[in-house]
Image (cartoon, coloured by chain):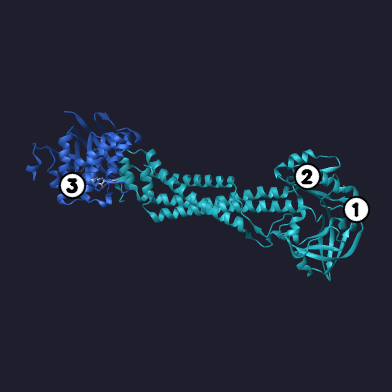
Amino acid sequence: MFRMAFRNLGRNRRRTLFSMLAVALGTALVLFLAAFVEGEIRGALDLTILLETGDIQVRAATYDEDKFSLAWEDLVEEPEQVAAQLEDLPQVRVATPRLRANGILSARDQTAGVTVLGIDPTSEASLPFAHGIVDGMFLTADDREGLLVGQPLAESLGVGVGDRVNLLVNTANGDVDEQTFVVRGIFSTHTPGYDKSTILLPLAKAQTFTRTEGHASLIFILLNDRQQADALAAAIQDPRYEVLTWRDLNELLIQTESLANAYMVVYYLIVIAITASVITNTLVMAVFERTREIGILAALGMMGRQILSLFMLEATLMAVGSVATGLLLGGASAAYFGVHGIPIGDIGAQMSGLLFGDAIYPYLTLDDTLTVSLIALGVTLLAALYPAILATRLEPVEALHAQR
Amino acid sequence: MEEVVRLENVTRVYKVGDVETPALRGLSLRIERGEFTALVGPSGSGKTTALQLIGCLDRPTSGRVFINGRDVTDLNARQRALLRRGTIGFVFQFFALIPTLTAYENVELPLILSGKNGRERKKRVEELLEAVGLSHRAHHRPDQLSGGEQQRVAVARALATNPSIILADEPTANLDTENGRQVMEIMQRLNRETGVTFVFASHDPRVIRFARRVITLRDGVAVDDKTLPEVTGEEQK
Ligand SMILES: Nc1ncnc2c1ncn2[C@@H]1O[C@H](COP(=O)(O)OP(=O)(O)OP(=O)(O)O)[C@@H](O)[C@H]1O
Ligand SMILES: [Mg+2]
């Protein structure tokens, strides 16, 4: 039986290969798409956490993220001490105060609305910025007139290292203040959406400039293990503070993920429908070609059920072979691009609210691999069922009368 | 004598669209164990149809079919498949081997279907290939065998499960005289040695010569039934 099914595959090699290729490519495509979407979401989540939200944020209970409020009562008091205490916790890799303010940056006749971020240049959490310097140098903690500008922003304003720029900010009491700074460096985090709207100041300077000395918008915390965020957040609850985890802070992104997964289902269905029709076609042709042979088998006393299993076995061999090939193909391309990335330029910058890097690194999960292989196998076999049933429906007499 | 096949007033009407073709119009016959019988008659007289009804590949429009004394007229597809498996062997006009299987595997197939174990199968297949003189061709595939050799493999396969009856529809029609004679001689010898019943359809006088009983069909009824005196293969030539 097995031998027969196996040899049947070799009978019309071109056709078998063609349909196996179709299934393999379909599987590979779906697998790659799954890895692509997963990688896209993971990349965006990693970037957002690393640059913006952290694994956990501690901020004043009344802080309103959308307003970037700088009123003292909306800020964390004595943030250095709070951060130091948090950093003593074993789960915490780094905790650092940050100040966020709205500002307007102008150079010559160009202006742009920006987010002013006051950071501690010596903190490990600032490494992505330090490593992202593409021109000039990084900030020092005691710099009083230097700032860093994101690369796309610098380009659109036409400023370079050493140029003077004018920065206007809101202050704690609701006024605005203005001062001239020198561009010390240009940075790129490879996140166009972030880099085009962010300028960096040393925390101390940002505080004096906005009249928020001794205060910070938030304590930015990175953990050794992101999965501990919920447990730790629960442990450091305090009525003065609001403690948020990366999950709370990235709701939009996490929702996007489920949306993307829903989209994936549509892709799956399209690819699968095409693959299934190829399989069905191949086997229907095989059944017609082998009508007389089916008649012989029936005459020898093979029952409908056994003829069905013969065709299904044939389909299974084909499915297993081609799905394995597909997994290999899809897995290999996902792995290749997972290392080298797929450049997408600043497309990501257009997606407001989410941070996308300038390249997508496909990421293949075991879950996706299993789902894709099971679906591909299942669909192939389901598609084979109709021709196989067709084979069993043949009346032996008529089958024997067939010309081939 | 023991009855193997009995047809009682069997009719078979083929319907294609609105056209009805009566292939058999009330055929009755009895075949005893060990017979070597030819169904003869002009083209379209219903030979193939009669063999298919005897072989439980098809069901009559009316009348009854008995195999080994059992009424098989109303068996369902599954029951008929089971009956064919153990009781009936077929040899067809075209060389009905499975093209992907070797001679050996083709003969083995009905044994696998009837659930024989590996050792039994090996013994039986070797014995049968020996009997049709093809031991040396066991591992060739059908396309590597001549028509005569293929038909001999088909005879071996038909015999594999020790059926009560072997039905052969124009077994030599696609063979040259020499190969046709060889196949007929093998069937005749097996009939003598094992006592298995053979019924074959033919309109070739060279084939009909081998028969010990000749039933003549015309327009779907038996018009003549002659039992010939026992003669040897040698005298027949
Ligand atoms: N499957 C079928 N559908 C319709 N008509 C059929 C079918 N099989 C046979 N017939 C018709 O039934 C009649 C008897 O056919 P059958 O094949 O039994 O004759 P036969 O004696 O075997 O002829 P031949 O010597 O040509 O093989 C013929 O008229 C034939 O056309
Ligand atoms: Mg015929």
Left or right of residue A43: residue A182: right
Q: Are marks 3 and 2 on the same chain?
A: no
The residue type indicated by label 3 comes to: Pro
Q: Residue at x 57, y 56 (%)?
A: A336
**How dense is the environment of label 1, judged by Cα within 10 Å: few (below 14), some, or many (20 and up)?**
some
Asked if residue B23 is positioned above or below residue A41 in the image, the reply reads above
Dot 1 lies on which element?
loop
Residue B215 in view here: no
| Sequence-first tag of 1 and 2 | 1
Look at the image and give the colour of chain A: cyan
The residue type indicated by label 2 comes to: Leu
Residue hosting label 3: B42
Residue at the left extreme, as displayed: B235
Residue hosting label 1: A213
Residue hosting label 2: A244
**How dense is the environment of label 2, judged by Cα within 10 Å: few (below 14), some, or many (20 and up)?**
many
Look at the image and give the colour of chain B: blue
**How dense is the environment of label 3, judged by Cα within 10 Å: few (below 14), some, or many (20 and up)?**
few
Q: Residue at x 64, y 57 (%)?
A: A360
Q: From the viewer's perspective, is the residue at label 3 or at label 1 nearer?
A: 1
**3D distance between C-alphas at marks 3 and 1:** 115 Å
In the picture, which quadrant includes the N terminus of chain A? top left
Q: From the viewer's perspective, is the residue at label 3 or at label 2 nearer?
A: 2
Which of the pair B158/A337 is nearer the observer? A337
Q: Chain of mark 3?
A: B
Q: Tell whether circle 3 marks a residue whose Cβ is less than 8 angstroms from ligand 1.
A: yes
Left or right of residue A184: residue A209: right
The residue type indicated by label 1 comes to: Glu
Residue A19 percent across, percent down from the top left:
45, 53
